[in-house]
Image: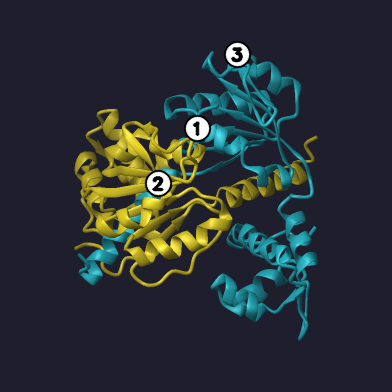
Chain colours: A cyan, B yellow
């Protein structure tokens, strides 16, 4: 494996490389130099060379990178050559948005079940995936290998639920509640903090208005 | 102002402080030491003292921090003592999820309009906010001070739309499409990269399974 001893900072940048290379692939670009890629991605060419050297380079001096190969290799490092069994807990707008996101399935994230407490939603389906009563959640998780549970439930319920899911055997939690979990070893958590993101935006707007005196 | 010359890393951590202090406030905690806060937040006490010293400290040696005061001051730094006029472009599941998120309005982000192209959605409203035809978007933005446009449109439309919004006078773009924008000065962008987040999760699950040999 490539990825022994690679810094978290590099790992965090890989999805972005993967995304840019995917866009190039879609536009039938075969090769790209670190200089061209750096202009697109707005990072330095030396940063790119350094990052990609962590994985054995992939590039040939003077020829640039083979886009398809590099895309595939980064995909493997990210684990995108595998299939993941994903469940969604919470069939509200956000849960439905995730269920409807076609790119996820294309990258191997296969949604097998959606769970909710709302009797009006139970029994319906989204893109062919049934919305089930959350009462059956424990049974399902204990009897199926669930890689990822996407949690789109209210904050008040999220911590307890995450703890239960970890105990029942879920490997990863994709959390959308504005809360950080402290879970046992053997479970990984990735949180999308929407409100933190919005606060960074208000900070930037405020800073910009104060600097420029605009309006 | 406090925030001259403060590193971006500290600024990025502020929403998380704000969130934890808000939780403490809700639980009627009046004072907290950097040690207690560090245990909750899973960062070192010295990191906390160092971060908060950037803003004049707020703490008294031996007495800890006044939670309400600190929460309020960090809120001001983040610009949360102001009101923001927010529009949402894209009334699909994700746009509706944002429109339905009650915390945003409580923090001063007031949604004034939602825009969409879908005739089935136009004329409906979400929490009292009307969904309007996107044909009226330019007029609205040119004639109103729009702080933030939340973009929940397909990737193919996002770049053009962001450029137009910038030209028409929007100050900040809260982007949910998997794309990075290069916009002129005077507009700030904050992107929520859902798929990057999911890829970091698959990486972590893969790394964990390989390390532990689980399954």
Q: Nearer the viewer, mark 1 or mark 2?
A: 2
Placement of A167 over or under A14, stated as above or below: above
Q: Is residue B42 left or right of residue A61?
A: left
Is residue B44 in sight in this rendering?
no
Q: Is residue B132 left or right of residue A189?
A: left
Placement of B121 over or under B167, stated as above or below: above
Residue B147 in percent (x, y) is at: 30, 55
Query: Distance between the Cα atoms at labels 2 and 3?
Result: 35 Å
**On residue B88, which mark appears?**
2
Q: Is residue B84 left or right of residue A15?
A: left
User: Same chain, marks 2 and 3?
Assistant: no
| Quarter of the rendering occupied by the C terminus of chain A | bottom left
Residue B79 in percent (x, y) is at: 26, 53
Query: Distance between the Cα atoms at labels 1 and 3?
Result: 21 Å
Q: Dot 1, crowdedness within 10 Å: few (<14), some or many (≥20)? A: some
Q: Secondary structure at mark 3?
A: helix
Q: Quadrant of residue B138?
A: bottom left
At x 55%, y 37%, the residue is A97
| Quarter of the rendering occupied by the N terminus of chain A | bottom right
At x 66%, y 43%, the residue is A102
Q: Earlier in the sequence, mark 1 or mark 3?
A: 1
Determine which residue is flagged by label 1.
Answer: A93
**On residue A66, which mark appears?**
none
Chain containing the residue with disc 3: A
At x 61%, y 37%, the residue is A100
**On residue A135, which mark appears?**
3
Residue A71 in percent (x, y) is at: 74, 62
Q: Secondary structure at mark 2?
A: strand
Is residue B91 in sight in this rendering?
yes
At x 54%, y 25%, the residue is A161
Placement of B6 over or under A159, stated as above or below: below
Chain containing the residue with disc 2: B
């Amino acid at each position: 494996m490539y990825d022994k001893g690679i810094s978290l900072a590099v790992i965090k940048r890989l999805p972005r490389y993967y995304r840019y290379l995917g866009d190039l692939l879609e536009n039938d670009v075969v090769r790209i130099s670190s200089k061209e890629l750096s202009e697109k991605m707005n990072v330095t060419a030396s940063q790119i060379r350094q990052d990609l050297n962590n994985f054995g380079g992939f590039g040939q001096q003077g020829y640039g990178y083979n886009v398809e190969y590099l895309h595939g290799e980064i995909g493997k490092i990210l684990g995108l050559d595998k299939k993941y069994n994903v469940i969604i807990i919470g069939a509200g707008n956000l849960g439905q948005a995730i269920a409807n996101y076609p790119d996820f399935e294309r990258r191997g994230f296969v949604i097998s079940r959606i769970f909710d407490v709302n009797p009006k939603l139970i029994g319906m389906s989204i893109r062919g995936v049934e919305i089930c009563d959350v009462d059956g959640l424990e049974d399902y998780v204990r009897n199926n290998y669930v890689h990822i549970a996407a949690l789109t439930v209210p904050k008040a319920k999220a911590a307890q639920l995450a703890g239960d899911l970890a105990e029942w055997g879920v490997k990863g939690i994709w959390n959308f509640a504005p809360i950080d979990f402290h879970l046992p070893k053997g479970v990984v958590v990735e949180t999308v903090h929407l409100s933190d993101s919005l606060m960074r935006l208000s900070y930037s707007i405020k800073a910009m208005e104060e600097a420029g005196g605009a309006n």
